[in-house]
Image (cartoon, helix red, strand yellow):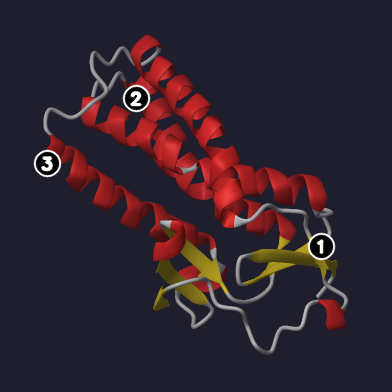
Amino acid sequence: MRFRFGAPPGADDFKPEATGWRPIKEPSPWVMQFFALPLGILVAVGLGAAWVGLATVDELFPSSYAILAFEFVVLVVVHELLHTLIHPHNGRSESTILGFWPSRLLFYAYYNNVIPRNGFIMVLAFPFLAVSIMPLCLSILLGIRSSVLAFVSVFNGLLSCGDLLGALLVATQIPNTAVARNKGYRTYWKIGK
């Protein structure tokens, strides 16, 4: 695993158009965040309602701004690390890159190689499933009432908005039998390897 400050890398050896790779239709990072934010708000509101209604949590927000800031930092790190767990070799390869793109206010986990289409979708969806959905389900089943867990679940739902929109774009544009790969911010696919 490597760390990067700046935009996701564009693999110099990867020439998508020259080797039969097709780009998916996806917006620029700013436009993606613009469209993803309403989705994130809807998801967060739905999760909040589920925590209050089904898990019977009384409050969703931390008691201080210091706790909120700490939870945000920890959540961003955990969220991105969870993406890498689904990368081939569980993120323990030179192809896995964790980064921060300051000009887009974007943290990312990037895999600089080929992934099967369904694996690509799972990379995008896993932090949402692990941090937002699974704790809610366990709380309902086990009767756990934790406002900290509820807040982390709801806030991660909001932070996952770009991932969820990206998973939707991949699921609707790339065939099941295809593989996918990124070059910088752009996503490409082709059938087989």
Of all residues, the one furthest to the bottom in this rendering is: 13
Residue 178 disc label: 1
Q: Amino acid at mark 1?
A: Ala
Name the foreground residue: 57 vs 16: 16
Residue 120 x/y as whole percent: 65, 58
Q: Find numbered disc 2 in the image and state the secondary structure of the residue it sits on.
A: helix
In the displayed structure image, the side of residue 22 where residue 125 appears, left or right = left
Is label 3 in contact with label 2 (beta carbons under 8 Å)? no
**Residue at 39% over, 10% down:** 53
Residue 94 x/y as whole percent: 49, 83
Dividing the image into 4 quarters, which one contains the C terminus?
A: bottom right
Is label 2 in contact with label 1 (beta carbons under 8 Å)? no
In the displayed structure image, the side of residue 18 where residue 31 appears, left or right = left
Give how far apart the Cα atoms at labels 3 and 2 are: 25 Å
Mark 1: few/some/many CA within 10 Å (<14, 14-19, 20+)? some
Name the foreground residue: 130 vs 187: 187
Please name the residue that numbered disc 3 is placed on: 66
Mark 2: few/some/many CA within 10 Å (<14, 14-19, 20+)? many
Q: Find numbered disc 1 in the image and state the secondary structure of the residue it sits on.
A: strand
Dividing the image into 4 quarters, which one contains the N terminus?
A: bottom left
Residue 79 x/y as whole percent: 39, 52
Q: Is residue 148 above or below residue 92?
A: above
**Residue at 43% over, 63% down:** 103
